[in-house]
């Protein structure tokens, strides 16, 4: 195996794939990256057996071949090299790296010991605008459950071309205390069939990271292609491909739980509301994390908390009220997560009463809503 490319391209390829490589007492090779040189390029691949990521690095092929070396070690070393040419060669002692008048050899393991990464058919892929999908992932994936008792809640529900919303992907995540939902428009030319699946949160997080960090010297791709089978998904973006297992089971029907009519709608600055919540959180009761939101006429929102041990705090915010005065007690962590996911100037709080879910949304984030269950006093 002999291959030459630029330091920039090799480092980016390693940055894209090495994130999921990790130590395993049973399979040490899972910490390695598979390097396969063929057909004018170097293909880098890693896997944790639940998910696999591969990236193609363009360069000059002098001799095909394959080998595996520790992913983090290789990435850390390549990051220290200056821009320019890097030559890779498989020698008797391992992988020889020549660049910057330096020669380094990294010992690895034979490619034959690396787990087989399944090849899935990409026919009938759904298509998305990369920037839109990246935003949607950041607005939904954080709300998944961390509990292992209900595996179906540890992933994000994805429904393609539902009857109510054709030409869209409906993404939703919940931990039973809050729910985040985002409608993502599908790009033309993709699969038109109705389908649904539950994608592990870690896989979606990895997809979001790839969409944020991938760069190509001939331009950043605008479209993401996403194919699914009964048990796996494959996502393609430029020279990067991700394969992941899907979560078995049925996602709960949450739609009847989302309120459609409200007694109070209050619009307020997202930044000011986030500051008020941070201040009130200092005096919230530990383990309960409760703060009270009280809408007062005319157009006043009080954000307050109190604890017998630490004290009390109140912030008064001005905004626009449609409807009547109202109040509700919410977990400040849940509300803060939702506000951080929006990234807009203004947000809207929609309330019914102290015992009903609160809907948080923004007119500038189309198709997104975040629902938080109240803390009952």
Image: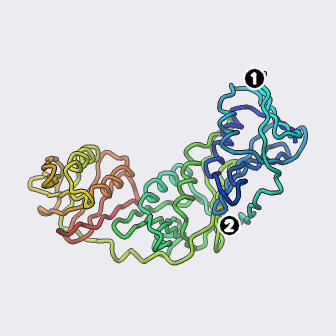
Q: What residue would you read off at disc 1?
A: 100
Q: Residue furthest top?
A: 101
> Any mark on residue 174, and which?
none
Mark 1 vs mark 2: which is more N-terminal?
A: 1
Residue found at x 64% / y 60%: 51
Tell me how the rendering is colored. rainbow
Pointer 2 local density, CA inside 10 Å: few below 14, some 14–19, many at least 20: some
Within the image, what quadrant is residue 194 found in? bottom right
What element does badge 1 sit on? Answer: loop
Q: CA distance from mark 1 to mark 2?
A: 46 Å
> Any mark on residue 124, and which?
2
Query: Is residue 25 positioned above or below 174 on the image?
Result: above
Where's residue 290, x and y in %?
A: 22, 59
Given residues 197 and 150, the one toward you in this image is: 150
Residue found at x 75% / y 60%: 115
Pointer 1 local density, CA inside 10 Å: few below 14, some 14–19, many at least 20: few
């Amino acid at each position: 195996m002999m291959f030459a490319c630029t330091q920039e391209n090799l480092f980016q390829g390693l940055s894209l794939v090495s994130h999921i490589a990790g130590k395993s007492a049973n399979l040490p090779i899972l910490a390695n990256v598979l390097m396969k040189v063929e057909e004018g390029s170097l293909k880098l691949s890693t896997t944790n057996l639940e998910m696999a990521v591969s990236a193609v690095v363009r360069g000059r092929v002098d001799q095909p071949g394959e080998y595996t070396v520790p992913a983090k070690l290789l990435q850390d070393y390549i990051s220290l090299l200056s821009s320019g040419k890097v030559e890779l060669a498989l020698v008797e002692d391992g992988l020889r790296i020549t660049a910057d008048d330096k020669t380094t050899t990294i010992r690895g393991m034979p490619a034959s010991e690396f787990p087989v990464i399944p090849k899935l058919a990409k026919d009938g892929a759904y298509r998305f605008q990369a920037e839109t999908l990246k935003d949607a992932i950041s607005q939904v994936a954080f709300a998944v459950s961390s509990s292992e008792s209900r595996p179906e809640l540890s992933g994000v529900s994805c429904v393609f071309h539902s009857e109510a919303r054709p030409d869209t992907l409906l993404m939703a995540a919940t931990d039973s205390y809050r729910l985040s939902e985002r409608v993502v428009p599908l790009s033309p030319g993709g699969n038109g069939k109705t389908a649904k699946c539950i994608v592990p949160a870690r896989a979606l997080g990895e997809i979001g990271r790839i969409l944020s960090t991938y760069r190509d010297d001939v331009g950043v791709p605008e479209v993401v292609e996403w194919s699914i089978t009964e048990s796996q998904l494959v996502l393609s973006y430029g020279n990067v491909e991700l394969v992941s297992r899907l979560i078995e089971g049925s996602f709960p029907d949450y739609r009847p739980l989302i309120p459609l009519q409200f007694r109070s709608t209050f619009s307020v600055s997202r930044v000011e509301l986030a500051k008020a919540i941070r201040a009130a959180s200092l005096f919230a009761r530990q383990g309960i994390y409760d703060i009270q939101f009280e809408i007062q006429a005319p157009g006043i929102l009080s954000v307050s908390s109190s604890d017998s041990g630490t004290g009390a705090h109140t912030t008064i915010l001005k905004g626009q009220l449609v409807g009547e005065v109202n109040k509700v007690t919410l977990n400040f962590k849940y509300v803060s997560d939702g506000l951080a996911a929006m990234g807009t100037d203004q947000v809207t709080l929609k309330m019914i009463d102290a015992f009903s879910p609160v809907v948080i949304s923004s007119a500038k984030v189309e198709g997104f809503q975040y629902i938080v269950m109240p803390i009952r006093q």
